[in-house]
C-alpha cells in the first residue's frame, strides 16, 4: 500500500484540469503536479534546437542534453526549468501545445518522464493531472477522476483564458487545435488518453468551477479519510 495519497485527474485539453487541480491541491494541502507542463518543457527544448516533434532520430540523439527541474512557489504554482532556465511562461503558447501533443507520442519521451512523476507521488500527497495518470503513471492512485467537457465548451473556455492574457486568438482556431490534440492524444500507441475502469467521470460542460470543485471534493471525501 502506498504511504501517500494521490488524486489522479485525467482528461482532454481544456477540460479545466489544471485550474481545478491547483485549487484542490491548495485546499487539501497536497502538491499539485501539472504533468502537461513537463511535456511542454520537452517540446520547448526541441523547439529551441530546431528539431521537429516528429523527428524521432533527432529526439533520441539529443534527449540526454535536457535536464528538467520543477520548483513550486509559495502559491503552489509549478515552475518549469529547462537546463536551469525558467520556461514556465514560454511553454504556454498554442504552438507548444501542439508540439507537446506530438512529442508526447514517443515512448522514449514518456519513459524518461515516468520516474520523475512517480517519485513526486512517492514523496508527497499529490493532485496530479495529465492524460495517463490513472492508467500508467499512478495505476494505484487513491482517487481517479476523468474530467471532460464538450470540445466546444473547452474551446470557448480556452479562448477566453487566452484573450484574458492578451493573446490574439479566435474561437474557431482554438476549437480546431483542441480537436486535433484530442485526436492525437487519444490515438497514439503509447499511453493514449482514455478513461480507466476505476475512474469517476465528470462532464463539466454545464458546470462552473465552484460546482466542479465541490463535486470533486465529494468524490475525494468518499475515498480519503482526513
Ligand atoms: O495538459 P496540457 O494541455 O498542458 O498537455 C500538453 C500535451 O502534453 C497534451 O496535448 C498531451 C501531452 N501530455 C501527455 O501526453 N501526458 C500527460 N500526462 C500530460 C500531457
Image (tube, rainbow, N blue to C red):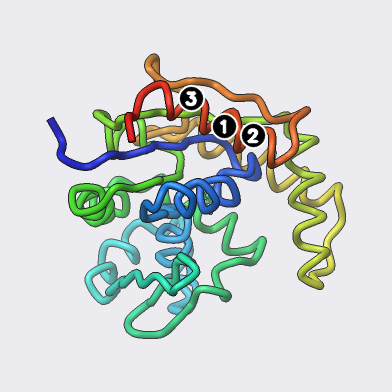
Mark 3 vs mark 2: which is more N-terminal? 2
Q: Secondary structure at mark 1?
A: strand
- Tell whether circle 3 marks a residue whose Cβ is less than 8 angstroms from ligand 1: no
Q: Secondary structure at mark 2?
A: helix
Residue 129 appears at what percent x and percent y? 45, 45
- Tell whether circle 2 marks a residue whose Cβ is less than 8 angstroms from ligand 1: no
What's the distance in space between the residues labelled 1 and 2, CA to CA? 9 Å
Could you tell whether 132 is left or right of 180 in the image?
Answer: left
Depicted 55 relative to depicted 142: above or below = below
What's the distance in space between the residues labelled 3 and 1, CA to CA? 12 Å
The residue drawn where x is 84% and y is 68% is 168
Mark 3 vs mark 1: which is more N-terminal? 1
Residue 69 appears at what percent x and percent y? 31, 72
Label of residue 147 in the image = 1
The residue drawn where x is 25% and y is 55% is 120
Label of residue 219 in the image = 3
What's the distance in space between the residues labelled 3 and 2, CA to CA? 11 Å
Image-quadrant location for residue 196: top left
Could you tell whether 123 is left or right of 191 in the image?
Answer: left
Mark 1 vs mark 2: which is more N-terminal? 1
Which residue has dot 2 on it? 212
Discs 1, 2 touching: Cβ within 8 Å: yes
Residue 106 appears at what percent x and percent y? 35, 48
Label 1 or label 2, whichever lies nearer to me, is 2
Q: Secondary structure at mark 3?
A: helix
Residue 162 appears at what percent x and percent y? 76, 62
The residue drawn where x is 60% and y is 38% is 213
Discs 3, 2 touching: Cβ within 8 Å: no
The residue drawn where x is 29% and y is 47% is 125
Amino acid at each position: 500500500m502506498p504511504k501517500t495519497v494521490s488524486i489522479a485527474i485525467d482528461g482532454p485539453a481544456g477540460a479545466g484540469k489544471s485550474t481545478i487541480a491547483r485549487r484542490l491541491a491548495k485546499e487539501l494541502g497536497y502538491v499539485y503536479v501539472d504533468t502537461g507542463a513537463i511535456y511542454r518543457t520537452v517540446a520547448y527544448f526541441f523547439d529551441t534546437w530546431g528539431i521537429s516533434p516528429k523527428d524521432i532520430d533527432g529526439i533520441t540523439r539529443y534527449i540526454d542534453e535536457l535536464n528538467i527541474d520543477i520548483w513550486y512557489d509559495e502559491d503552489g504554482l509549478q515552475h518549469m526549468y529547462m537546463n536551469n532556465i525558467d520556461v514556465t511562461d514560454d511553454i504556454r503558447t498554442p504552438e507548444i501545445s501542439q508540439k507537446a501533443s506530438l512529442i508526447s507520442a514517443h515512448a522514449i519521451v514518456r519513459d524518461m518522464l515516468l520516474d520523475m512523476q512517480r517519485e513526486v507521488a512517492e514523496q508527497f500527497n499529490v493532485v496530479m493531472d495529465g492524460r495517463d495518470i490513472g492508467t500508467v503513471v499512478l495505476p494505484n492512485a487513491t482517487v481517479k477522476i476523468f474530467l471532460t467537457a464538450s470540445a466546444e465548451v473547452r474551446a470557448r473556455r480556452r479562448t477566453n483564458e487566452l484573450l484574458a492574457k492578451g493573446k490574439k486568438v479566435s474561437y474557431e482556431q482554438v476549437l480546431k487545435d483542441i480537436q486535433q490534440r484530442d485526436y492525437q492524444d487519444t490515438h497514439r500507441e503509447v499511453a493514449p488518453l482514455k478513461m480507466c475502469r476505476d475512474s469517476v467521470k465528470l462532464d463539466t460542460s454545464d458546470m462552473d468551477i465552484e460546482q466542479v470543485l465541490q463535486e470533486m471534493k465529494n468524490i475525494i471525501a468518499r475515498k480519503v479519510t482526513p
